[in-house]
């Protein structure tokens, strides 16, 4: 079909408020909004002000009222436990209502914060929706984060309750969550009143008297009492959730998502971007701890009346590289959304795609890739093997839905490898130089979005308006700074090339090298350090740390390197994936003392590099090159 993209984007450009007012009709409102956009409210304005609604109502009750009660809302597929469960919209509502009653009985109400630290199990989704039902604000913390990261989030949002589980299951090992939760409760200066703990049979946990409550017992007792719980009306601008993401310092940023704009944007994107219809099965193979999981495992599919897949497994190893194709065949998945890293992992194990051909994928229409740059090689392999459109799309935790992509729902545009294609309605994307001037087409620069950001994007950081202004809006007045670098070509296609800050992307997970440096520097023997992202064939990037040891230290450097690896794992969690740490004599610096991380990265990746004109001592780069060579990394020639 011919794409209607230009017409639709043009309609938004001509009348942005009319465009979003129409899109807002796709969800149910308890009270209509007064204004589509109020520029006087919030940091840069607020969408749909005065409107009252409820996200859980639109996800569940509304779908049941429309006759979808018996349809699967969610299929839980867990190869790590050998479980498949089908949850209809009606069954899900019963669980969510009972849990909402448990929350209420624990004294949680509208606006209170609930931290959810859970593996990929249905109860995690119920915990999110039950929070939405009572107008509370959830903050999901990814299971691969360590106790101190969990504690930082509990304390920043001053959670009243933590919902957790006894364990998570990774390939071949069970991870006890409870010791991490207990440690976080200990460290956090703010103490939530209670922890609601879901006991999994694979590993149960000791509950702390008074504080901890057994999840299943509480829910069944609420059901036995015939608990009912209507949805609490909330303002469109009231927060639905906070999702912490890596910033340029160790202190994570609490990205706020509101109720109204979020629903409107997600519903629009399900239909017009992903091209998924109500009743169809949509699978985002991510984790509920990430933004993709929030938006497209939970809220997007349910708001659309589709069926979501909740997959507790990996692309490889559970049990093999054919896992995705089994799920697609077995549950008739129409579209899959994952990170390119998953495809690189699959390709490594099954380069000829033999495991793909043994499956019936006739119902499968499209593959969406996001979370990191989709390398042309991976896209080409996936296209050849799957024979469906492979759609790169670019966005970030802050935006909450794709900024750019090839809109399947509006009709596909020609594909350009390496480009996330075109901006979606709502987004006016520009490229500016460091002084804030527009650059010519095809020229690399700072990727920014003209304010206001569309519905669904963050209105601010949690209780940190000023930090939001400083971090995102101050550098380029009138624009939101994405902290990505890229260019727009003659045809208006967007190419996202790299970050402009210290964030690296490891297996689709966003990590701050700055926060890793803070941890390295906290080691008593470390005088100076630099952490950079280096290329990795599967994960895209992995961190590598360079340490300068204090002069008076006589210990073996290998011991210190091991301690640093353990320290980062302990403080951030296994997801940080810091495995390469190298002690060096000196770090390369400019004459003004700035560490030349960019040049170090080029050296480590074996890319060509130029001797920086401002370098203090060129010999240091040779030392770094030698240290890398000794570990089998990089090359030495400038
Ligand atoms: N709970 C506890 N630990 C976790 C975890 C969780 N939820 N998720 C990951 N970890 C651990 C892993 O077990 C691993 O530990 P290890 O160092 O002891 O091996 C570590 O964190 C790093 O995990 P990861 O970066 O995921 O690497 P991996 O080698 O386990 O798997 C992939 C690599 C590519 C298979 C995996 O990253 C993947 O499936 N990616 C899919 C894309 C995705 O989810 N993207 C998210 C955003 S869309
Ligand atoms: P996160 O907030 O974890 O979703 O990470 C967002 C960051 O990941 C972006 O700012 C980009 O740097 C990167 N990213 C996400 N999707 C893409 C993509 N399709 N192409 C290039 N980079 C991407």
Image: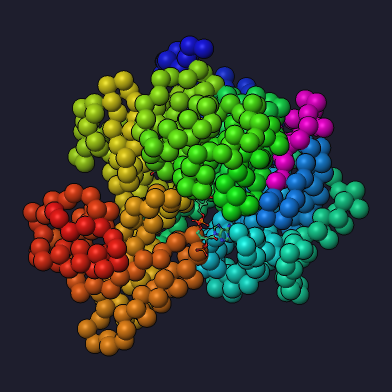
Q: Is residue 228 visible?
A: yes
Residue at figure coordinates x 49%, y 71% from the top left: 570
Residue 519 picture location, percent across and down:
39, 70
Name the foreground residue: 334 vs 172: 172
308 to the left or right of 287: right
Q: Splitting the image into 4 quarters, where does residue 59 fall?
A: top right
**Residue 252 as seen in the image, left or right of residue 140:** left
The magenta stretch spans residue 73: yes
Front residue (pair 585, 552): 585
Q: Which residues are magenta?
A: 57-77
Q: Is residue 128 visible?
A: no
| Percent x, y of residue 144 | 55, 60
Q: Identify which residue is drawn at 56% across, 50% down.
A: 316
Residue 635 or residue 544, whichever sits in front: 635
- The quarter of the picture where residue 551 lies is bottom left
Queried whether the magenta region covers residue 62, the answer comes back as yes
Residue 15 in picture, x, y percent from top left: 45, 17
- Judging depth in this view, the residue of 65 and 45 nearest the camera is 65
The colouring scheme, among rainbow, by chain, secondary structure or one colour, is rainbow
Residue at x-position 50% and y-position 53%: 244
**Looking at the image, how many numbered discs can be counted on the residues?**
0
> Vertical placement of 178 versus 157: above or below?
below
Residue 526 coordinates in the image, percent (x, y):
30, 77
Q: Residue at x 81, y 37 (%)?
A: 90
């Amino acid at each position: 079909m011919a794409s209607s993209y230009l017409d639709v984007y043009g309609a938004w450009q001509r009348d942005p408020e009319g465009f979003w007012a129409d899109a807002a009709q796709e969800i149910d409102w308890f009270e209509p909004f007064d204004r589509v956009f109020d520029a006087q409210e919030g940091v840069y304005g607020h969408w749909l002000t005065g409107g009252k609604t409820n996200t859980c109502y639109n996800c569940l009750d509304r779908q049941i009222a429309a006759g979808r009660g018996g349809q699967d809302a969610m299929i839980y597929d867990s190869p790590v436990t050998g479980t498949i469960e089908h949850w209809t919209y009606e069954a899900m509502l019963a669980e969510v209502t009972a849990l909402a009653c448990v929350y209420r009985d624990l004294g949680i109400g509208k606006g209170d914060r609930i931290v959810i630290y859970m593996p990929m199990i249905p109860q995690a989704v119920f915990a999110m929706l039950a929070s939405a039902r009572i107008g509370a604000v959830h903050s999901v913390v990814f299971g691969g984060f360590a106790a101190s990261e969990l504690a930082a989030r509990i304390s920043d949002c001053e959670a009243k309750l933590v919902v957790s589980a006894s364990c998570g299951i990774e390939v071949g090992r069970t991870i006890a969550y409870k010791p991490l939760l207990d440690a976080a409760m200990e460290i956090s200066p703010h103490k939530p009143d209670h922890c609601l703990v879901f006991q999994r049979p694979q590993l149960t946990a000791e509950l702390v008297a008074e504080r901890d409550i057994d999840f299943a017992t509480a829910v069944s007792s609420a059901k036995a009492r015939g608990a009912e719980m209507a949805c609490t009306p909330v303002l469109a601008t009231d927060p639905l959730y906070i999702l912490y993401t890596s910033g340029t310092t160790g202190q994570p940023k609490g990205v706020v998502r509101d109720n109204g704009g979020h629903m409107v944007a997600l519903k629009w994107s399900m239909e017009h971007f992903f091209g998924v219809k109500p009743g169809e099965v949509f699978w985002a193979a991510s984790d509920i701890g990430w933004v993709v999981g929030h938006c497209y495992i939970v809220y997007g599919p349910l708001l659309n009346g589709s069926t979501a897949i909740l997959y507790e497994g990996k692309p490889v190893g559970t049990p093999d590289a054919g896992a995705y194709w089994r799920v697609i065949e077995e549950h008739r998945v129409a579209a899959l959304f994952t990170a390119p890293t998953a495809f690189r992992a699959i390709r490594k194990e099954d380069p000829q795609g033999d495991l793909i051909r043994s499956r019936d994928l006739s119902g499968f229409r499209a593959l969406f890739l996001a979370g990191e740059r989709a390398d042309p090689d991976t896209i080409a392999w996936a296209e050849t093997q799957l024979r469906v459109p492979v759609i790169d799309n670019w966005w970030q935790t802050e935006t909450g839905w794709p900024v750019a992509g090839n809109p399947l729902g509006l009709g596909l545009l020609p594909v350009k490898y390496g480009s996330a294609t075109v901006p979606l309605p709502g987004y006016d994307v520009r490229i500016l130089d460091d002084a804030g001037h527009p650059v010519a087409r095809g020229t690399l620069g700072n990727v920014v979005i003209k304010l206001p950001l569309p519905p669904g994007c963050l209105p601010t950081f949690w209780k940190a308006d000023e930090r939001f202004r400083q971090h995102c809006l101050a550098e380029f007045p009138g624009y939101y700074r994405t902290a990505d670098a890229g260019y727009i070509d003659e045809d208006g296609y967007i190419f996202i090339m790299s970050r402009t800050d210290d964030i690296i992307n490891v297996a689709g997970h966003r990590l701050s090298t700055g926060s890793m440096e803070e941890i390295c520097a906290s080691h008593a023997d470390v005088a100076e350090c630099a952490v950079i992202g280096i290329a990795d064939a599967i994960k895209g990037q992995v961190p590598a740390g360079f340490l300068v040891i204090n002069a008076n230290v006589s210990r073996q450097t290998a011991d210190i390197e091991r301690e640093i690896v353990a320290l980062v794992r302990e403080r951030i969690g296994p997801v940080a994936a810091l495995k390469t740490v190298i002690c060096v004599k000196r770090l390369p610096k400019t004459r003004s003392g700035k560490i030349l991380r960019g040049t170090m990265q080029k050296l480590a990746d074996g890319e060509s590099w130029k001797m920086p004109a401002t370098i203090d001592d060129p010999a240091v780069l040779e030392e770094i090159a030698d240290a890398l060579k000794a570990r089998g990394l990089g090359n030495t020639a400038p």
